[in-house]
Amino acid sequence: VPAISPDGKRVVYRADNQIWVRSFDSLDPVEVPESTGALYPTFSPDSTAIAFLKGAQLYRAGLDGTKPVALGKVPSDSNGSGGLCWLPDGRIVVAGSNQVGLSTVSDRGGDFTEVLPLDKKTDVDFHEVSPLPNGVIFTVHHTVSRQADTIEAWVNGQRKVILQQQGESLRRPIYSPTGHILYARETINPGLWAVKIDLKTNKVAQVIHFDEKVAPQGSYLNDVRFSPDGRHAYLTDAG
């Protein structure tokens, strides 16, 4: 899944089993060394570095092609539909394990710390984590539905349900500075959706369904990314 830097100047993505970084003012990407098989590239909040997983290890790399630095170990089963999220306080959030919930590693290095455990009675795992102003949002794969039918938030150390749609598969929630959460539905009402929710009251203020003109068939709806100001979204086209 590609990620746009917070300053809006670069994109990091995975291609040919490698991680690449490209400036929007250049057609030539820079290959990140020793990134074969790496997953979940994400930018630092100041847009000067990236982090990624490789095996059971978290790495940090500059944007100039220098060799990555190992930060610490992560749960060994953090794969599939997991993800990384680099917070302004220097913690990198890791999701995707079915043994550990959300965990964090310092961007200076160290062991991982579990900050939000799985509820083993209801949760299979957490997927696709992305930042909020004061926490993160992620999807929850439930044991009963066997689907990721819920978007939740970890805000100020507390877990709360943002959106739940039984029977639906919800993917890649991302927060816009406008206050909207953009996400993809894959089952009942497939397509690209946005919802505006007051995080203090959890009440839905607005729901938007993007039609075929905005999100045509063949677009990779799981790969949507916002511009830094939240006013534009970028889709990867299958063609």
Image (cartoon, rainbow, N blue to C red):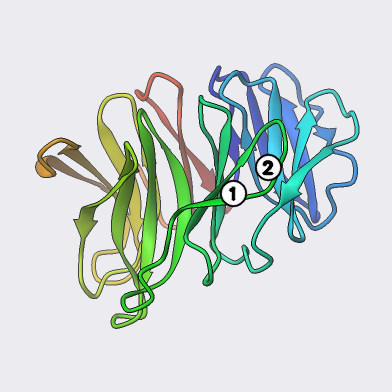
Q: Amino acid at mark 2?
A: Tyr
- Number of labels in the image equals 2
Q: Amino acid at mark 1?
A: Val
Give the answer, above or below, for where 124 lies relative to 193: below
Q: Is residue 221 at all visible to an observer of this figure?
A: no
The local secondary structure at tag 1 comes to loop
Q: Within 10 Å of the Cα at label 1, are there few (<14), some (14-19), or many (20+) other Cα atoms?
A: some
**Residue 217's spot in the image, x, y percent?**
42, 57
Q: Is residue 114 at all visible to an observer of this figure?
A: yes
Residue at which label 1 appears = 1
**Residue 130's spot in the image, x, y percent?**
45, 42
Q: Within 10 Å of the Cα at label 2, are there few (<14), some (14-19), or many (20+) other Cα atoms?
A: some
**Residue 207's spot in the image, x, y percent?**
15, 44
Q: Residue at x 52, y 71 (%)?
A: 98
Q: Is residue 210 left or right of residue 97?
A: left
Q: Residue at x 78, y 25 (%)?
A: 63
Q: CA distance from mark 2 to mark 1?
A: 6 Å
Towards the viewer: 152 or 155 = 155
Towards the viewer: 192 or 119 = 119
The local secondary structure at tag 2 comes to strand
Cβ atoms at labels 2 and 1 below 8 Å apart: yes
Q: Quarter-wise, where is residue 32 in the image?
A: top right
Q: Quarter-wise, where is residue 180 in the image?
A: top left
Residue at which label 2 appears = 13
Mark nearer the N terminus (2 vs 1):
1
Towards the viewer: 53 or 183 = 53
Q: Residue at x 79, y 33 (%)?
A: 61
**Residue 223's spot in the image, x, y percent?**
51, 48
Give the answer, above or below, for where 196 lies relative to 185: above
